[in-house]
Image (tube, helix red, strand yellow):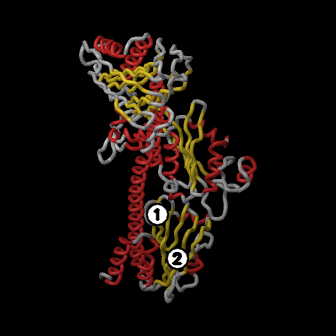
């Protein structure tokens, strides 16, 4: 005959199980129906961990309105013999035969009329087991009671399994979200140390309470970054990362081991993370400032410290390591697969930053060799230059400039721009600058120098064209200078007069490297003391604001505002203004500025003694 009361109760229990977030939430739906079974006087459940650690006991007696609940962490060694296998086990035991040493339920059972304890022991997960039992008298249908216990246990196990599964899915989703965010954060920086600091910050507190990151150098691990949820303990972690010999030796022994290793308990003896008071005292004496804020020091109800070390490997080589410090329950420790994935992403970001840094140094070194290291200066002119790299990928640019003293006491200024970027542009840049410099040093006039450079480019079958302008400043007996300008498709120089007016030098001419036989005409005009000649590449004029306007439209006004300043200030100010103005465009900006100081009328016009000043980089 079907027991409708129990069937309804079991149905309600399954419904409650589908909604429960904790198994303990099922207690009322389990205990009350079992207690309503004829002959049952007491229902009692226990939860065990590590075979013999009693974590929880709950009992409800007939006629009682509230259960007796005991939460503890008591070790009951004799209870280990009760631990079930993979399948639930139902046992009948006389209450009088229960040994208190292994049965904490015995005391409660003796207070009720029941003479027999019917108990089902079952495994919930790998960390522990549980039991659900009833005290019954002689009137009870023990077989029916056993069946109900088995059915209730089935629901409890299914509920616990579902909770674990939902928890794993939630953690997996959170892990995936964290990994995605970590990749975005780490990939957004190409600075090595900033990337390493981001690795540490992203992981705390989502992954661990603390983190240390080391970069692998030829001489061994180098501490770069540390963080902790506690500011005080963060300082302690930073000191450990820099100075602790135990950690340094451990990281060195790890070498290229790819597996994440977890260390806890005795494995941390002698380390700054040990939970023993002795280790804490010893470390405070040798490493700390006496504040006692050490990661891993035991105290109060804090969880024992666990550390994990993951090797950071990218593109077949080890770039560093990340050490996590945990002070949380074992159930909240991340899995090895998650840590490997995080370490792989961190390693790739770090390696990208390292490669970018190497490339940046190589590009800057090459760029330095394509530009003059020094500019000539006498009491007749004030020279300066500025160079701003515009390409975030740091390919070598094609902009170049130089200033060349000539045998007749004049000075030749040259500036140019090779189409495109990269190694081929760099090769043409070097050819153009050194060809023009050699010809101008020999006294060749600007037009002839440009024509001969064009011929050289055509003979070399250069696949790129370039623009250039050459201007010479020749001192005159009246204290002025003759400005002779010749251009090959390059932006026209500007002249800032001493009275603040700005004029454009008339120029024209075909690009270099396009046709075989090309001649270039020169334009002449006078400049007086205090006048300034400004040569620049199109990266200056083509800097573009968000609204679409070019810096070229406001350049004369900006230049006029610099009246009275020396050449260095003018060059640097214009470059920075264009850079700040630019919302789009990534071309390099090169400027060469010459301020004519003049010579007294009737003075000797032979070449004046030269000094050399450092050129812009």
In the rendered image, which residue does mark 2 sit on? 58
Q: How many other residues sit within 10 Å of disc 1, few (<14), some (14-19) or many (≥20)?
A: many
Distance between the Cα atoms at labels 1 and 2? Answer: 17 Å
> Where is 562 relative to 526, above or below?
below
In the displayed structure, 492 sits above or below 563; it is above
Q: Could you tell me if the residues under marks 1 and 2 are in contact, i.e. CB atoms within 8 Å?
A: no
Q: x, y (%) of residue 442?
A: 43, 10
Q: Quadrant of residue 557?
A: top left
Q: Nearer the viewer, residue 609 or 350?
A: 609
Residue in the picture at 50% in, 80% down: 135
Along the viewing direction, whichever of 467 and 334 lies nearer the viewer: 467
Q: Earlier in the sequence, mark 1 or mark 2?
A: 2
Mark 2 crowdedness (10 Å alpha carbons): few <14, some 14-19, many ≥20: some
In the image shown, does 196 or 568 lie closer to the viewer?
Answer: 568
Q: Position of residue 399 (x, y in %)?
A: 38, 27
In the image shown, does 435 or 230 lie closer to the viewer?
Answer: 435
Q: Quickly name the residue at label 1.
A: 123
Quadrant of the frame with the N terminus: bottom left
| Tag 2 secondary structure | strand
């Amino acid at each position: 005959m079907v027991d409708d009361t129990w069937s309804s109760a079991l149905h309600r229990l399954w419904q409650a199980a589908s909604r429960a977030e904790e198994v303990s939430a099922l207690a009322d739906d389990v205990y009350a129906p079992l207690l309503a079974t004829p002959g049952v006087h007491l229902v009692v459940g226990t939860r065990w961990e590590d075979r013999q650690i009693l974590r929880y006991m709950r009992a409800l007696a007939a006629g009682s309105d509230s259960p007796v609940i005991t939460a503890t962490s008591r070790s009951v060694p004799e209870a280990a013999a009760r631990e079930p296998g993979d399948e639930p086990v139902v046992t009948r035991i006389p209450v009088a035969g229960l040994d208190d040493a292994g049965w904490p339920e015995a005391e409660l059972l003796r207070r009720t009329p029941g003479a027999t304890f019917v108990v089902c022991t079952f495994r919930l997960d790998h960390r522990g087991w549980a039991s659900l039992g009833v005290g019954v008298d002689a009137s009870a249908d023990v077989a029916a009671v056993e069946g109900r216990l088995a059915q209730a246990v089935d629901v409890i196990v299914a509920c616990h399994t579902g909770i674990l599964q939902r928890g794993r899915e939630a953690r997996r989703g959170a892990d995936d979200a964290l990994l995605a965010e970590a990749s975005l954060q780490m990939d957004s920086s190409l600075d090595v140390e900033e990337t390493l600091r981001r690795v540490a910050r992203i992981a705390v507190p989502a992954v661990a309470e603390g983190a240390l990151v080391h970069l692998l150098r030829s001489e061994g691990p180098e501490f770069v970054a540390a963080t902790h949820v506690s500011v005080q303990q963060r300082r302690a972690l930073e000191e450990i990362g820099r100075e602790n010999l135990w950690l340094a030796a451990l990281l060195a022994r790890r070498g290229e081991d790819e597996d994440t290793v977890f260390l806890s308990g005795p494995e941390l003896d002698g380390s700054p993370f040990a939970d023993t008071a002795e280790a804490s005292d010893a470390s405070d004496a040798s490493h700390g400032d006496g504040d006692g804020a050490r990661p891993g020091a035991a105290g109060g109800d804090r969880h024992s410290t666990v550390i994990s070390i993951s090797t950071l490997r990218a593109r077949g080589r080890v770039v560093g390591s990340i050490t996590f410090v945990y002070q949380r329950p074992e159930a909240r420790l991340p899995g090895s697969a998650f840590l490997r994935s995080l370490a792989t992403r961190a390693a790739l970001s770090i390696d990208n930053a390292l490669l970018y840094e190497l490339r940046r140094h190589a590009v800057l070194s090459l760029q330095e060799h394509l530009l003059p290291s020094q500019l000539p200066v006498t009491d007749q002119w004030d020279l300066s230059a500025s160079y701003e790299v515009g390409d975030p990928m740091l390919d070598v640019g094609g902009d170049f400039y130089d200033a060349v003293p000539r045998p007749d006491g004049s000075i030749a200024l040259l500036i140019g721009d090779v189409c495109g970027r990269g190694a081929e542009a760099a090769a043409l840049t070097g050819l153009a600058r050194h060809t023009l410099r050699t010809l101008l040093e020999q006294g060749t006039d600007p037009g002839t120098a440009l024509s001969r450079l064009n011929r050289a480019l055509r003979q070399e079958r250069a696949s790129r064209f370039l623009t250039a302008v050459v201007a010479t400043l020749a001192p005159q007996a009246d204290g002025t200078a003759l400005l002779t300008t010749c251009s090959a498709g390059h932006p026209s120089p500007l002249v800032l007069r001493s009275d603040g007016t700005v004029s454009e030098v008339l120029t024209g001419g075909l690009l270099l490297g396009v046709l075989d036989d090309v001649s270039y005409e020169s334009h002449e005009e006078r400049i007086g003391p205090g006048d300034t000649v400004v040569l620049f590449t199109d990266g200056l004029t083509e800097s573009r604001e968000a609204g679409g306007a070019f810096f070229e439209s406001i350049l004369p006004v900006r230049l006029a505002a610099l009246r009275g300043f020396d050449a260095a200030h003018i060059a640097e100010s214009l470059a920075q203004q264009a850079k700040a103005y630019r919302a789009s465009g990534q071309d390099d900006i090169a400027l060469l500025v010459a301020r004519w100081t003049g010579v007294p009328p009737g003075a000797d016009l032979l070449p004046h003694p030269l000094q050399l000043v450092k050129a812009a980089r």
